[in-house]
Image (cartoon, grey):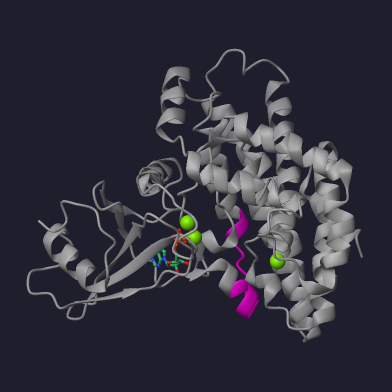
Amino acid sequence: SRFSNYFLMKNEDVIDYAKERLDFFAPGSELECDEIGDGNLNYVFKVRDKKSGKSVIIKQAGETARISDEFKLSTNRNRIESEVLVLQNKLAPGLVPAVYQYDDVMSCCVMEDLSNYKILRAVLSEDHRIFPYFAEHITSFMANTLLLTSDVVMNHKDKKDAAVNFINPELCEITEDLVYTEPFNDCFGRNDVFTSNQEWVAAEIYGDDQLRLEAAKLKFQFMTNAQALLHGDLHTGSVFVTEKETKVIDPEFAFYGPMGYDVGNVIANLMFAWANGNAVIKDEKKRSEYIAWLEQTIIDVVDLFRSKFSAVWDDSVQDVMAKEKGFKEYYLQNIITDTAAVTGLELIRRIVGLAGVKDITSIVSEHDRMTAERVLLTAAKTFIKNRYSFVKGQDFLDTLLQVQ
Ligand code: ADP
Ligand code: MG
Ligand code: MG
Ligand code: MG
């Protein structure tokens, strides 16, 4: 078979692949295929039968990044993504797409087509729509996938095997560089700072020695705290939504790391949507409703995560020492501290670093974008430096609101 050796597929190859390798389509189907990827790393093909309308998604990993040959990456990330989606569907049922099959040779994953959903970042920054169930769903996803893969719940030997199975050095290196290193240094040549903020960033980010020291501490904590199986890339571009449903996609950065990395990513990306709404929505009533929903959602993500984490803990924790009085509160407070730090790191890396977000880059007014970036970066410094003082959702929102 032409699919016994790896190659990067084109649309026509994917149709042949679907005919030869999938049971999904009836014989005599009339298949069509489009590449619909919009991410940085991989190729996402949608295969559809024109007769029945049935469709699947085939996501294939290339040996370099989709956006640039400069990033050479193991295709093993597609195995990690496929296995993690299957596991997450067990731990947090219905909150990720169903995986139909994974092909280790072609490094591709065949999964449920979610084309009737929308990517959260797109509907937030383009339409400013409200998703009343998002906080509920994303906190169920995080409390379950994180706590149930950790040492406090799992058999300790099984957990160590899992940590080895999901070792992910190349994608971790991307995070170590793009989140934890380059945004704090002017010398790597890949930062992408808005012209009007270049002097400000030089003084307030590159020039802040205390901030850089805290970022250094956090970098080596990220690299060594094998606490739970993270999603690892839980921004609003990795979340599909409808009015009532939420599905998390794209866990190829998954590895055993600190739980607050996922929670902090969610919160920071809600803050990008908040800054976009404040800068862009002209109608006052629409703006205040949308902003009120985002502010409540920021609070709810922290507080619902806390309460669900606590409930899952009480149901699932086995280790006798973890049941020691006061230990749950200690453990959860450490996660909230990490969450605050990562909220700050993600805010900085998306504004200063290589990978920007549309919420900010789509703000047309030079003055409004400059201001939005400074507000978020100023809050980010507080999230990092004062991370030990954060407890509740309101603390996170207050830090954002206090900047103005
Ligand atoms: P990358 O790893 O390259 O970022 P993603 O998994 O984020 O790839 O997918 C890129 C895009 O492909 C998504 O933004 C979405 O538009 C589309 N896509 C990915 N998975 C699905 C799916 N299961 N159903 C429908 N569209 C999908
Ligand atoms: Mg993606
Ligand atoms: Mg990805
Ligand atoms: Mg930028």
Q: Residue 386: which quarter of the image?
A: top right
State the residue at coordinates (80%, 61%): 376
Q: Is residue 316 left or right of residue 266?
A: left
Q: Is residue 31 left or right of residue 120?
A: left
State the residue at coordinates (80%, 44%): 384
Which residue occupies the foreground of this view, 13 or 149?
Answer: 13
Which residue occupies the foreground of this view, 278 or 198?
Answer: 198
In the rendering, at what x and y percent does residue 276 appear?
A: 73, 73
State the residue at coordinates (75%, 34%): 217
| Res. 267 in view | yes
State the residue lying farthest toward the bottom.
283
In the rendering, at what x and y percent does residue 160 appear?
A: 46, 23
In the rendering, at what x and y percent does residue 110 appear?
A: 28, 57
Boundaries of the magenta span? 123-135
Instruction: Find out whether residue 133 is within the magenta segment.
Output: yes
Q: Is residue 283 left or right of residue 320?
A: right
